Amino acid sequence: MTTHNADIVTANEVRRALRAQLLNARQQVLADDKAVWDAKLCESLMAHLQALSPQPQCVALYWPIRGEPDLMPFAHAWLETGGDVVLPMVLEKHAPLKFGVYTLGTELKIGAYGIPEPDLLKLSMQVPDVVVIPCVGFNEANYRLGYGGGYYDRTLASWRDAGASVHSVGVAYGVAQVSFEQGGFDLPLDVILSV
């Protein structure tokens, strides 16, 4: 048992160091490069979703923080096509995410971890068709490295346990591709789009 705990601590320390390195690299991306990459990711995401069958209606996105790819132009374009957009809400620590309805007129409030999110009155009971997840890092096997809270892994697991089929899409800049071993609770994404 001591060995197992030591392995967990070592894995966490390695991931913590890798996460810090990747976040630093992402913060060093020049604003002009970021703008070009974000536009390409928005285009790639739109093309990817339009190629899915059946065609998705509700897409769970995220509000960009800490240098994450900004997909809000995609969100607005998706809304203009008649699609629905929801944003994550942390209502309880160490629990699956909930999602709130986002529209062009939605006023966001600062939620847990300082992230803008819809008001609780906008809570959606609908499971999205697609969830788009930012990656701090990712590997060739479509596993992502996040901030370490496990919110998206818990959310994906809860949907799968409930029998919901949600298409998962990771997004990241190419500088985020690294080698790492997935943890026991990590779930692979269906696809990762990167530039």
Image (tube, rainbow, N blue to C red):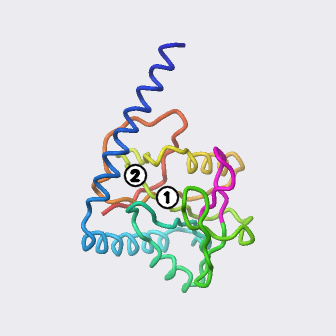
Report the residue at 62% width, 75% height from top. Answer: 102
Residue 168 shown left or right of residue 177 in the figure = right
Q: Which mark is residue 136?
A: 2
Q: Quadrant of the C terminus?
A: bottom left
Q: Read off the magenta span.
A: 87-99
Residue 107: % across, % down: 62, 78
Tell me: 164 left or right of 69: right
**What residue sits 60% from the left and 84% below the top?**
82
Q: Is residue 136 above or below residue 100?
A: above
133 or 92, which lies in front?
92
Numbered mark located on residue 146 in the image: none
Judge by depth and name the residue closer to the eye, 34 or 133: 34
Q: Residue furthest top?
A: 2
Give percent across and percent down for residue 159.
66, 51
Q: Which residue is mark 1?
A: 133
Callout 2 amino acid = Val
Q: Position of residue 84 (x, y in %)?
A: 62, 76
Q: Residues within 10 Å of mark 2 (few under 14, many from 20)?
A: many
